């Protein structure tokens, strides 16, 4: 299973940014952290991440708004997005997944397992795409 090589994170809480930086510096991954989603699409285009991890509640633009901007641009619409949030009630979780995000990670998260968790999500998405492509070819 191929692991994440490039990850982009949007998080406005400085203490969580520090933890994320520590997590990703310990892994063989290039990462970009930002606390402002107003330049989200441009940053994603420039960085070309394999996966985006973003906080749901942020100033200026919240996670769902940033996600919709990414989805509305064909150049970023295929980048998988995982939300991070402390608001993880069942209805909220359903609402986030209904938007089209690939998964939701609850805060507080375990820094020791976060990268493995993201890699698992990424691997499952890759497996789904491979299987979808195989099914498509076999039906032609």
Image (cartoon, rainbow, N blue to C red):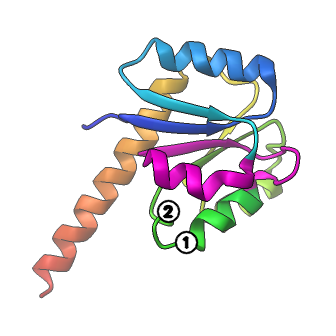
Which residue is at the far bottom?
Answer: 140
Find residue 8 and report its horizontal and vertical position in percent. 54, 39
Q: Residue at x 59, y 58 (%)?
A: 41
Q: Classify mark 2: residues with Cα within 10 Å, few (<14), some (14-19) or many (20+).
A: some
Q: Residue at x 46, y 44 (%)?
A: 47
Q: Is residue 74 above or below residue 120?
A: below
Do tag 2 and tag 1 residues touch (Cβ < 8 Å)? yes
Task: Find disc 1 in the rendering and name its residue.
Answer: 73
Q: Is residue 44 visible?
A: yes
- Report whether 86 appears left or right of 78: right
Location of mark 2 (residue): 76
Magenta residue span: 37-63
**Residue 43 x %, y %:** 57, 49
Toward the viewer: 122 or 63? 63
Q: Nearer the viewer, residue 95 or 56?
A: 56
Position of the C terminus, as image quadrant, is bottom left
- Between the residue at mark 2 and the residue at mark 1, the CA separation in whole angstroms equals 6 Å
Q: Toward which corner of the image does residue 6 lie, by quadrant?
A: top left
Q: Position of residue 87 (x, y in %)?
A: 84, 42
């Amino acid at each position: 299973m191929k692991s994440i090589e490039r990850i982009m994170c949007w998080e406005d809480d400085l203490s969580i940014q520090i933890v994320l930086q520590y997590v990703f510096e310990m892994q063989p991954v290039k990462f970009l952290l930002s606390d402002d989603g107003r330049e989200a699409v441009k940053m994603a285009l420039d960085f070309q991440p394999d996966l985006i991890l973003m906080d749901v509640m942020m100033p200026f633009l919240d996670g769902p708004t940033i996600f919709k901007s990414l989805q509305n641009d064909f150049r970023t619409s295929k980048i998988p997005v995982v939300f991070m949030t402390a608001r993880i009630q069942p209805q909220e979780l359903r609402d986030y997944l209904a938007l089209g995000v690939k998964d939701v990670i609850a805060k507080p998260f375990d820094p020791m397992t976060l990268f493995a968790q993201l890699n698992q999500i990424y691997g499952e998405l890759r497996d789904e795409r491979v299987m979808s492509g195989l099914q498509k070819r076999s039906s032609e």
